[in-house]
Image (cartoon, rainbow, N blue to C red):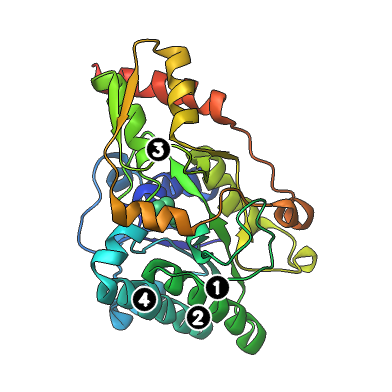
Amino acid sequence: MKRILVTGSVGQIGSELTLELRKRYGNDNVVAGVNRTQPTGLLKDSGPWELANCTDFEQLKSVVKKYEIDTIYHLAAILSGVAEAKPDLAWNVNINGLYNVLEIAREFNCKVFIPSSIGAFGPSTPPDKTPQDTIQRPTTMYGVTKVSGELICDYYYKRFGVDTRGVRYPGIISNDTLPGGGTTDYAVEIYYEAIRNKKFTCNLKAGTFMDMMYMPDAINAAIQLMEADSDKLIHRNAFNVTAMSFDPEIIAASIKKVIPEFTMDYNVDEVKQGIADSWPNSLDDSTAKEEWGWNPEYDLEAMTKDMLSVLEKKINV
Ligand code: SER
């Protein structure tokens, strides 16, 4: 039987992933691990939650022991914008936190899901249809921690047999919990502002292409990979996955189709622009398709339609 711990369960991905895992594996079998912020609403009411700060080895270990955890979805992480502002914090959470998770997984024989990111690539990476295996020399602190994470996860599998698995997520767009401090966050904020004010000021330049994905596909990617037949996995960690690639002009045009009065102007954040410019324009995710059947459901038009209709109800109630 599966006994799952989700770290970072109040975060953008963690909050929705925890609820989906509870649906699939039973409420009591999925522990929402939090750092400081207590869960609220359904996340709090539908199942157990515990303080499980990944930088606190003993605290994390005691939760794994108490609930006899056999699977960890390690979602606690510092995103790219915050990592540039606080590199020491990013190193501590993204590296030392992951190391703690892996050591505990080794001791308690847990399977581990760890997200990497498009941020694991850098300016010398081929930017279009970036291959699965290619140059990785990121120039951001976030990217440095993500590449290190990919490598240490491979190492723990090869050296100690810890069943580590992971994907390189693109920007994730969702209508529930907001992302915190990422470079791709504009693609979430634009929908909120389209509903609230029918206009948006974008902090990245026109022509800045990045990969993106709607949350239901991001959740499916994690669970599908964790359920995949181990023998079929040639890669284990850091699978390129994507659902779409667009720049600010293209997402704005897709919103305009639904809200014709919507307008957008620009006020570029140089730090975030620099980060975005160092990342690929689009990923090649054929390896994930071949090895475990990755197949996203939402394209830009379907996502925009759903985002706007959900946010319309949420904001205008
Ligand atoms: N969404 C993340 C960020 O922008 C990328 O993985 O930091």
Callout 1 touching callout 3 (CB < 8 Å): no
Label at residue 187 = 3
Q: Nearer the viewer, mark 1 or mark 3?
A: 3
Badge 2 element = helix
Q: Disc 1 to disc 3, how far (Cα)?
A: 26 Å
Say what amino acid the circle numbered 1 marks.
Glu
Q: Residues within 10 Å of mark 4 (few under 14, many from 20)?
A: many
Badge 1 element = helix
Callout 1 touching callout 4 (CB < 8 Å): no
Q: Disc 3 to disc 2, how far (Cα)?
A: 39 Å
Say what amino acid the circle numbered 2 marks.
Phe
* Residue placed under numbered mark 4 in the picture: 97
Q: Nearer the viewer, mark 1 or mark 4?
A: 1
| Residue 30 point in image, percent of width and height | 43, 56
Q: Nearer the viewer, mark 4 or mark 3?
A: 3
Q: Residues within 10 Å of mark 1 (few under 14, many from 20)?
A: many
Q: Would residue 27 be visible to someone looking at this image?
A: yes
Q: Going from the N terminus, do you reach mark 4 or mark 2 first?
A: 4
Q: Disc 4 to disc 3, how far (Cα)?
A: 28 Å
Quadrant of the drawing holding the N terminus? bottom right
Q: Going from the N terminus, do you reach mark 1 or mark 4 first?
A: 4
Label at residue 108 = 2
Q: Residues within 10 Å of mark 3 (few under 14, many from 20)?
A: many
Q: Would residue 29 be visible to someone looking at this image?
A: no
Name the quadrant where ligand 1 sits: bottom left
Label at residue 150 = 1
Say what amino acid the circle numbered 3 marks.
Ala
Residue at the image position 29 percent from the left and 70 percent from the top: 53
Badge 3 element = helix
Q: Nearer the viewer, mark 4 or mark 2?
A: 4
